């Protein structure tokens, strides 16, 4: 769906990974990228007043809210800006994919997951923010979120959310706080109650939780063109076998359902903040949120890991330095504490702005509190080929309840043999 809304300064205020394409945005001959100059809201010596057409890509859930916020930005500019905005609903993963395919026809402002920062920067899809704006953002946002938006000491994006991770939701009429500390105990209680754990075990994003917990890692580097150059991956190891052997319990279809088969039989769900409202509507007052459980591998008890990360807002480089200036101001406005708080109130998205994070409702929110507890066991999500998640998901999906150690070693060897082909992504 494509929303086109024209915002004029005099109008009243209205109240949720990678791609397989390589594309570097090249401006016409004689035109340079506008990077360090320009202005943000705190600068006064740069006249960027005027009329602008601005394309914005955001998640469907916040499209209407973003329209209202852009409207307010223009309405409170005192007649300085007339903005014709195209607010197009698009997931963070899809927006990164489309920007890397063709930056020139992409959005002027877009939200993406932090693991795409390097590739977007290398493909010239992000305009550097400049020292003045960086200094301001460091005062406004948490240190971790600023680091997530930075490369080599420069900020290339605006911190937007701090909730790109997952944790456990459960029905407290079936499970106790003690039950959910251990995966085997939780699965046994659910099976007895004829309920299921909804866990998307064939999705590499979630399957990684066991492998990361046992010490596996997969680190990828890119070259100056944004292509994947090399990797350091130890999944085919004793640590991978340890994870795979434990993962067999999640292959029991009688008690574990993938997300594609979610039903009202759920007694527990592993997912992120983006599903909070839906799950709350299903569990009602029985809903409790918690960090992920531990699992057993031999005589060892290991806490489940997870991916953890931030969502960022980027501004595309422009030939028109005035438009870059206005886009930066608008992005700074859309990610400020008040507007992050508005997204929290509507969708429970976790803020990065320090003032919003200290809001009592934010601190008391059960999903964000569970995510914060899981943070100690999480791994920051970094750049990798999108197909890597497919490879890991395929590996995890092939593990059966009756898989032997030899079976799992074979699966890990096949997984490793396929890694070089991902360098083409």
Image (cartoon, grey):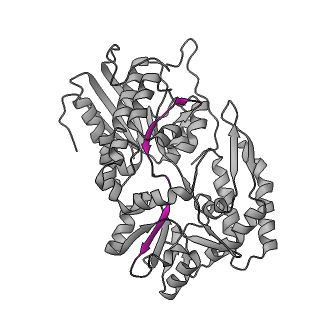
In this rendering, does residue 64 appear at all? no
| Residue 12 placement: quadrant | top left
Q: Residue at x 57, y 44 (%)?
A: 115
**Which residue is found at the position 48% from the left and 37% from the top?**
146
**Residue at image coords 22%, 28%:** 9
For this orientation, the residue located farthest to the top is: 30
Where does the image place residue 103, in percent across and percent down from the top left? 54, 32
Which residue is nearer to you in this view: 1 or 343? 343
Which region is colored magenta?
Answer: 152-174
Image quarter where the C terminus lies is: top right
Residue 125 horizontal side relative to residue 231, left or right? left
Residue 371 position (above or below residue 245): above
Q: Does the segment drawn in magenta span residue 124?
A: no
How many marks can you see? 0
Evaluate whether residue 143 shows in this view: yes
* Residue sticking out furthest to the bottom: 192
The answer to which quarter of the image holds residue 171 is bottom left
Say left or right for 420 vs 222.
right
Q: Position of residue 200 (x, y in %)?
A: 56, 66
Name the residue located 34 percent from the left edge and 69 percent from the top edge. Answer: 281
Q: Position of residue 223 (x, y in %)?
A: 70, 33
Observer-nearest of 115 and 17: 115
Q: Give above or below for 388 relative to 86.
A: below
Q: Report x, y in % for residue 155.
A: 51, 31
Where on the picture, by quarter, is residue 28?
top right
């Amino acid at each position: 769906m494509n929303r086109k809304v024209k915002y004029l300064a005099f109008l009243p205020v209205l109240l949720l990974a990678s791609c397989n394409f390589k594309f570097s945005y090249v401006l016409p001959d004689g035109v340079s990228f506008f990077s360090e100059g320009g202005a943000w809201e705190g600068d006064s010596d740069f006249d960027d007043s005027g009329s602008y057409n601005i394309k914005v890509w955001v998640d469907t859930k916040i499209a209407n809210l973003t329209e209202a916020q852009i409207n307010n930005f223009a309405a409170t500019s005192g007649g300085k800006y007339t903005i014709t905005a195209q607010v197009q609903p698009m997931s963070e993963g899809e927006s990164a994919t489309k920007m890397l395919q063709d930056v020139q026809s992409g959005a002027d402002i877009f939200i993406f997951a932090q693991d795409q920062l390097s590739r977007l920067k290398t493909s010239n899809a992000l305009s550097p923010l400049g020292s003045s704006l960086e200094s301001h953002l460091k005062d406004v946002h948490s240190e971790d979120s600023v680091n997530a938006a930075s490369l080599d000491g420069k900020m290339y994006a605006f911190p937007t959310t701090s909730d790109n991770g997952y944790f456990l939701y459960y029905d407290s009429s079936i499970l106790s706080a003690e039950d959910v500390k251990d995966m085997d105990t939780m699965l046994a209680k659910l099976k007895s109650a004829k309920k299921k754990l909804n866990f998307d075990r064939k999705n590499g994003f979630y399957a990684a939780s066991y492998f990361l917990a046992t010490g596996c890692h997969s680190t990828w580097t890119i070259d100056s063109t944004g292509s994947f150059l090399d990797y350091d991956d130890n999944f085919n190891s004793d640590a991978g076998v340890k994870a795979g052997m434990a993962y067999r319990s999640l292959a029991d279809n009688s008690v574990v359902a993938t997300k594609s088969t979610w039903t009202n039989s759920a007694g527990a769900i592993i997912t992120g903040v983006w599903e909070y409202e839906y799950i709350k509507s299903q569990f009602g007052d029985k809903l409790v949120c918690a960090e992920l459980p531990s699992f057993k591998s031999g005589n060892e008890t290991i806490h489940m890991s997870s991916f953890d990360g931030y969502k960022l807002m980027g501004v595309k480089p422009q030939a028109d330095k005035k438009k870059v200036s206005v886009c930066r101001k608008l992005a700074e406005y859309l990610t400020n504490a008040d507007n992050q708080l508005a997204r929290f109130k509507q969708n429970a998205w976790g803020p990065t702005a320090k003032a919003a994070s200290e809001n009592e409702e934010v601190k008391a929110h059960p999903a964000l509190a569970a995510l914060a507890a899981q943070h100690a066991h999480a791994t920051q999500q970094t750049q990798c080929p999108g197909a890597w998640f497919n490879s890991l998901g395929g590996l995890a999906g092939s593990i059966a309840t009756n898989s032997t150690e030899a079976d799992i070693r074979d699966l890990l060897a096949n997984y490793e043999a396929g890694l070089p082909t991902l360098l083409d992504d």
